[in-house]
Amino acid sequence: MADILPLMSTDDVAVGAVVRYPRTGTTGKVVRIEEIDGRRYAEIDSTGLYYRMDELIGADKTTGKREREDRSLEDYLKEHQELQEQLEEVWEKGIDQSCEGGG
């Protein structure tokens, strides 16, 4: 399987990079990078959703409109639910493990 690319280092993901999310095959350009509770997420232009940067792989090119047309509503909802669960997990851990300093 020579065409399978390894996961990218989070240092390799930058705004403008073309990436793919292997779980759903979503491909697009990174338009924004955010850090939430110590994890880095990249927003992909083709969906407007955030993906964990450590789960992205490099891609040769974007599929543009075709990417959007090929995705079913069920795929979109599943992907959205996975992202929501990841974000909830991050927030729960952040709140449960928070440590406020006293003065």
Image (cartoon, helix red, strand yellow):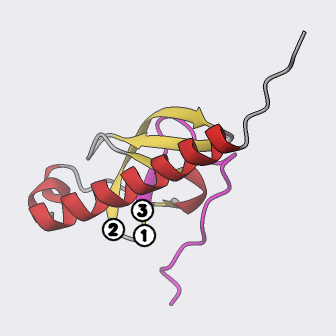
Tell me: residue 96, above or below residue 34.
below
Residue 73 location, quadrant: bottom left
> What's the amino acid at mark 2?
Gly
Residue denoted by label 2: 25
Q: Measure how far apart labels 1 and 2 are at the Cα level.
A: 5 Å
Segment tinted magenta in the rendering: 1-20
Q: In the image, which disc is placed on residue 22?
A: 1
Q: Residue at x 62, y 59 (%)?
A: 8
User: SS at mark 3?
Assistant: strand
Binning the other alpha carbons within 10 Å of mark 3 as few (below 14), some (14 to 19) or many (20 upward) gives many
Could you tell me if the residues under marks 3 and 2 are in contact, i.e. CB atoms within 8 Å? yes
Q: Is residue 63 visible?
A: yes
Tell me, for residue 31, which label it has, or none.
none
- Horizontal arrangement in the rendering, residue 54 relative to residue 71 (left or right): right
For the stretch drawn in magenta, the main secondary structure is loop
Label 1: element kind: loop
Q: CA distance from mark 3 to mark 1?
A: 4 Å
The answer to whether marks 3 and 1 mark residues whose Cβ atoms lie closer than 8 Å is: yes
Q: Nearer the viewer, residue 97 or 6?
A: 97
- Would residue 1 be found to the left or right of residue 40 on screen? left
Residue that badge 3 annotates: 21
**Residue 64: in magenta span:** no
Q: Which image quarter is the C terminus in?
A: top right
**Residue 66 rendering spot, x and y as whole percentages:** 14, 57
Across and down, in percent, residue 70 comes to 12, 65
